[in-house]
Image (spheres, rainbow, N blue to C red):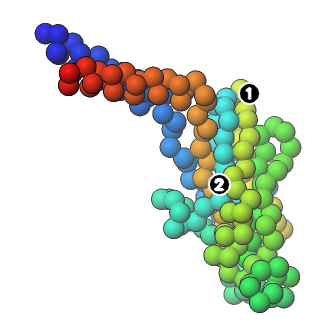
Amino acid sequence: MKKSLKSAFAAATAAAALAAAPAGAQVINLDAQTTTTAAPYTQLLGAGTYQVFDVGPADAAGALFEAWNPWGAGTGAGGCDTGGTNCAYGWYRRWYMDFGAGATGNNSGFFSSPALALAGAKTDDPFSFTLLAPTTVSFWIADSPYYDNAGGVSLSIAAVPEPQTWALMMAGLGLLGFAARRRAA
């Protein structure tokens, strides 16, 4: 009986520790033709601290886009340096978000390819923000006109675990280790 009680306690402790772990990241896809200033992607987020990362299809499941081109895919890029950066026009990762503090976002400049634009945007990651109460957060691509755009932007947004969450998880894992050690002795 004692052994099954200990096993039940260990299982309950493990479940509590896992429940305290942060939720997985969510991928947000902003299509450069449809996710506009007038029709943004909106998401209700709870109070807490969040991080936004620029991602592409190779980085995260569900990510659809590396970058977008405001002149269409057929236009390509021009006026670039030998590394395919600092272009006069081309592919880029400009996106905006608003969580009640005014619009903010990423604008890493123009690149000769979607892959280079994504790599350039990642140098500014992550973008962090804190919400004091549940808030609807809006994400969009700003351009005019939208009909000639090609591609889009994929973002990964995740809650940052609070210190007390980590403490609870570590305590649960410590109790599991203690229970296993006592069982072995």
Q: Answer few, some or many: residues within 10 Å of disc 2's Cα (few below 14, many 20 plus, some between 14 and 19).
A: some
Residue linked to disc 2? 53
Quadrant location of residue 53? bottom right
Pick out the residue farthest to the front: 185
The quadrant in which the C terminus is found is top left
Residue 8 visible (yes or no): no
Q: Which residue is mark 1?
A: 132
Amino acid type at circle 2 is Phe
Closer to the camera, 35 or 103? 103
Q: Secondary structure at mark 2?
A: strand
Q: Vertically, is 158 above or below 126? A: above
Q: Nearer the viewer, residue 53 or 14?
A: 14
Q: Position of residue 51 (x, y in %)?
A: 66, 45
The type of residue carrying mark 1 is: Leu
Q: Can you say which quadrant of the picture contains the N terminus?
A: top left
Residue 52 shows in this picture: yes
Query: Dot 1 surroundings within 10 Å: few (below 14), some, or many (20 or more)?
Result: few
